[in-house]
Image (spheres, helix red, strand yellow):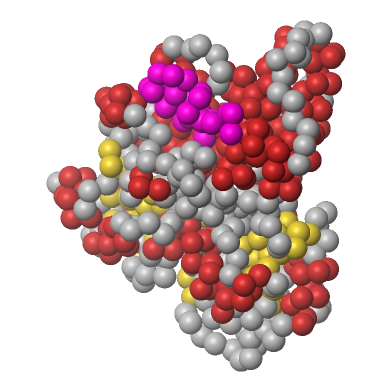
């Protein structure tokens, strides 16, 4: 295997024996094979559209789901990939027959998981291009596309779809094996960022349309005596269905990881048994899940290898998979609820303080006049967006120290699981505005962008002219797609860490530095001094 798509890749270069994430060589190869078959489907889908044919909706959805399933920490179950590859190949062949495309060069994909894994070894990411810089750009495109597919799938689950998004996913996939030049690939990469903005806009519409705009909410970090279910991942619909199915059962529902912002949605917080938040970020699952006395439900992504002590208590749903872990489908969480009833739950109430969430765009823009006045009066000197992915690799304490050292006349905006490096810090307020504003999940990056655009409009300047600095951490491919969106918007001076992507060559990095002044983090002291003077 060779995989360098996440920040924690082995030795900062690439995993070659087993993924640091827990991905086996066989699963890695099957995922590479799936991308190859998706590339072939993309080529046929383009031909279909060019011939005036409508690509069926189920093929579009299958494409985004399949691409998303190859994102880090989603599906580690090789057997689950077998029917996915078969379905993608069948869709490819059916479309090819309709347009009269030559299918002679298509990859044949029948066989067991082991056989498909062996076949997948013929399609490594290192084969995207012999030129390392062009290969780097193609990897950026593919990895960014995985993030786009994730957000596209999240939005589609809530009924928000756009044919143009699916068409781009097919276009980008089909571009991977083509002999494209530097400028063509750069344009595609930036277009990937543009399409990701559209996907996040659809997801925002889906979430707020179904569950209301988030409102500032105090979320307890302690427990309530009684049976319990813990929900991790990102999916709001799964959480809503679980809340409905557990209402009146005496089971309390807790969030973990990026589900914390769900407490701010009016249509979710109205459930009395939706109690509080337990634990921190995804990489701490082994310890935190082992200590949780109830059932655990993993949605969308961020699963780690379950420890034996809780393997029988954890369930996956949606695209998430782990060998030997019970998978529940179609929104039926009866097995999860049954398991929660068998487990002890929390013996007594506990008070571990609370945190605030719910500062998405509607809330922040609702007090924009106070924010603007604070800047004009000098009470607010600077804004820092400190967020992104958390992870286990050393160096992420930088983000904790940065927030702790940020002057008291600055405001910290945060989102995604990177917030767990400092989410419970008591930073006070400026004129009644909390200094720490939790915008939401990584899925809510659209909110952060809209806040920045609105402030720029209010001050009649560009986003790059605002007293705003982006200090981002990355781990997986959703972060790549968000970064591409920021670059598409022309955002400059982004500080990125804790390390730069292994798939970015020196020449590609130099291009990013010259055009966007993107830079690696250094130390909190040095970066604060450089930003604030």
Q: Nearer the viewer, residue 146 or 460?
A: 146
The stretch in magenta equals 121-143
Which residue is at a point 61% across and 44% down the rendered structure image? 26
Which residue is at a point 63% across and 34% down the rendered structure image? 120
Q: Is residue 152 visible?
A: no
Relative vertical location of residue 87 with respect to residue 163 in this rendering, above or below: below
Q: Nearer the viewer, residue 9 or 360?
A: 9
Which residue is at a point 74% across and 47% down the rendered structure image? 80
Relative vertical location of residue 251 with respect to residue 77 in this rendering, above or below: below
Residue 370 % position (x, y): 39, 54
Q: Nearer the viewer, residue 455 or 147?
A: 147
Residue 393 % position (x, y): 37, 56
Quick check: 225 left or right of 470? right
Q: Nearer the viewer, residue 231 or 114?
A: 114
Which residue is at a point 66% across and 60% down the rendered structure image? 298
So how many labels did they put on this image? Answer: 0
Residue 495 % position (x, y): 31, 43
Residue 301 % position (x, y): 61, 52
Q: Main secondary structure of the magenta part?
A: helix
Q: Is residue 473 visible?
A: yes
Residue 87 counted in the magenta span: no
Residue 125 counted in the magenta span: yes
Quick check: 283 left or right of 204? left
């Amino acid at each position: 295997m060779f995989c360098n798509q996440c920040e924690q890749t082995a030795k900062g270069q690439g995993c070659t024996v087993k993924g640091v994430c827990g991905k086996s060589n066989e699963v890695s190869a099957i995922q590479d094979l799936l991308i190859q078959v998706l590339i072939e489907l993309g080529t046929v889908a383009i031909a279909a559209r060019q011939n005036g044919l409508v690509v069926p909706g189920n093929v579009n959805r299958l494409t985004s789901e399949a691409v998303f399933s190859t994102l880090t920490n989603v599906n580690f179950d090789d057997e689950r990939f077998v029917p996915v590859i078969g379905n993608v190949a069948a869709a490819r062949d059916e479309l090819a027959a309709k347009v009269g495309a030559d299918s002679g060069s298509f990859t044949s994909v029948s066989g067991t998981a082991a056989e498909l894994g062996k076949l997948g070894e013929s399609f490594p990411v290192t084969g995207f291009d012999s030129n390392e810089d062009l290969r780097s750009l193609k990897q950026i495109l593919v990895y960014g596309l995985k993030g786009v597919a994730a957000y596209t799938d999240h939005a589609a689950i809530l009924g928000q779809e756009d044919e143009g998004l699916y068409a781009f996913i097919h276009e980008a996939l089909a571009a991977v094996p083509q002999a494209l030049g530097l400028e063509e690939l750069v344009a595609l990469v930036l277009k990937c960022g543009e399409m990701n903005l559209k996907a996040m806009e659809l997801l925002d519409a889906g979430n707020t349309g179904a569950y209301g705009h988030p409102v500032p909410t105090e979320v307890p970090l302690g427990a309530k005596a009684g049976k319990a279910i813990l929900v991790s991942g990102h999916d709001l619909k799964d959480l809503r269905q679980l809340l409905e199915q557990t209402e009146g059962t005496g089971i309390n529902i807790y969030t973990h990881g990026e589900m914390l912002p769900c407490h701010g949605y009016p249509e979710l917080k109205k459930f009395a048994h939706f109690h509080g938040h337990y634990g921190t970020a995804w990489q701490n699952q082994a310890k935190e899940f082992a200590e949780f006395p109830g059932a655990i439900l993993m949605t969308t992504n961020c699963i780690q290898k379950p420890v034996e002590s809780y393997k029988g208590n954890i369930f996956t749903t949606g695209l998430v998979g782990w060998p030997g872990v019970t998978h529940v489908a179609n929104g039926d969480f009866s097995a999860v609820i049954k398991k929660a009833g068998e487990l002890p739950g929390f013996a007594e109430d506990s008070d571990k303080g609370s945190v605030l969430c719910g500062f998405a765009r509607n809330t922040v823009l609702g007090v924009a006049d106070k924010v603007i006045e604070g800047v004009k009066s000098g009470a607010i000197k600077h804004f820092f967006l400190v967020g992104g992915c958390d992870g286990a690799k050393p160096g992420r304490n930088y983000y904790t120290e940065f927030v702790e050292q940020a002057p008291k006349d600055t405001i910290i905006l945060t989102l995604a699981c990177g917030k767990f490096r400092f989410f419970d810090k008591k930073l006070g307020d400026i004129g009644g505005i909390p200094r720490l504003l939790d915008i939401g999940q990584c899925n809510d990056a659209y909110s952060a962008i809209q806040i920045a655009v609105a402030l720029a409009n209010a001050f009649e300047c560009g986003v790059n002219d605002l007293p705003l600095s982006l200090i981002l951490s990355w781990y997986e491919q959703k972060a790549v797609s968000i970064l591409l969106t920021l670059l598409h918007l022309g955002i400059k001076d982004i500080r990125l860490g804790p390390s730069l992507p292994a798939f970015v060559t020196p020449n590609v990095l130099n291009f990013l530095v010259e055009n966007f002044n993107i830079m690696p983090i250094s130390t909190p002291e040095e970066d604060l001094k450089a930003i604030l003077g």
